[in-house]
Amino acid sequence: MSHQALDQVIDYLQQLQDRICHALEAADGGAIFAEEQWQREGGGGGRSRVLRDGQVLEQGGVGFSHVFGPQMPASATAHRPELAGRNFNACGVSLVMHPSNPYVPTSHANVRFFIAEKEGSEPVWWFGGGFDLTPFYPFDEDIKHWHRVAKAALDPFGEELYPKFKAWCDDYFWLKHRDETRGVGGLFFDDLNDRSFEESFAIMRAVGDAYLDAYLPIIERRKATPYGERERNFQLYRRGRYVEFNLVWDRGTLFGLQTGGRTESILMSMPPLVRWEYGYQPEPGSPEARLYSDYLRPRDWLTEL
């Protein structure tokens, strides 16, 4: 595989970061992303963009990174032993949006490309990505819209992809220690290399391009919804699940830290404010209880709502 292919992916990712930041600034209407460029000691770097204290977004981060090195970290070779002894390039865009209004869901998206090479051997490469939605006070029409956009993005590549990547998302974002999903899911895929490079790259682009179509209408519908201290406290409590997942289960967080990535950039997905409460139980019959009973489990959102 030529280095031109890697350059094509990097160009797309940087343009995607630009497009997403511009669109979210317009949707927020009160703040802009501040950028920090950083270099990794072992090779590579990136640009981290963070928006704070906006009219809609309490904090949002959109990061681009391209890191490379002569050998893989232990976490990666344990998962993929064939990567041992290979140099690697890893690049991606990752984002998390934490709105201030509890009626606007938190959202996450990520698209990435990885290639590992060794002289005399074929390169090992794959694409990954996805996006998922974490509402605190769910609206069925929002969830259906989110999943309709996800399905429409993948259908041109085969109708089997949406149910496959949707189930993969439900499984990946399952908090085993809480016995619940992180939210209402979306798409997740990794190790995509069973098609040509061109088609695999097109699938990744379709997912990356669909994020704004999925999220912006939800922001517009919910950003002016009145809320009070009760809703805000529940939002901060549920944000704790986000922290738990990222620190306990997320492979990307572990990979970034083990490859010597920039810690601030890796952890910029964390919510700015969060609370834990020992033994919390929602009031029976409340909207908070409905989140647990009706939404924090895998469901076919396109037919069951």
Image (cartoon, grey):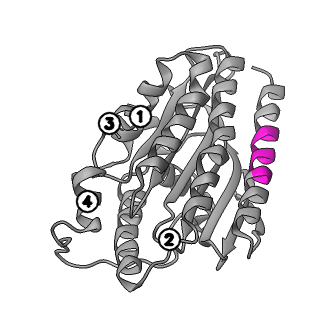
**Residue 13 forms part of the magenta stretch:** yes
Q: Is residue 155 above or below residue 182?
A: above
Mark 3 touching mark 2, by CB under 8 A?
no
Please state, as top left, top right, bottom left or bottom right, where the C terminus lies in the image: top left
C-alpha separation, residue under disc 3 versus residue under disc 4: 15 Å
In this figure, which residue is indicated by the disc labeled 1? 302
Residue carrying label 3 = 304
**In the rendered structure, which disc, 4 or 1, sits on the residue that comes first in sequence?**
4
- Secondary structure of the residue carrying numbered label 4: helix
Q: Main secondary structure of the magenta part?
A: helix
Q: How far apart, in angstroms, are the residues tagged by discs 4 and 1? A: 19 Å
Where is residue 261 drawn, in percent x and y? 61, 57
Out of 227 and 178, give the one closest to the viewer: 227
Q: Which residues are magenta?
A: 10-19
The answer to which of marks 4 and 2 sits earlier in the sequence is 2
Label 4 with label 1: CB-CB less than 8 Å: no
Name the amino acid type tagged 3. Answer: Glu
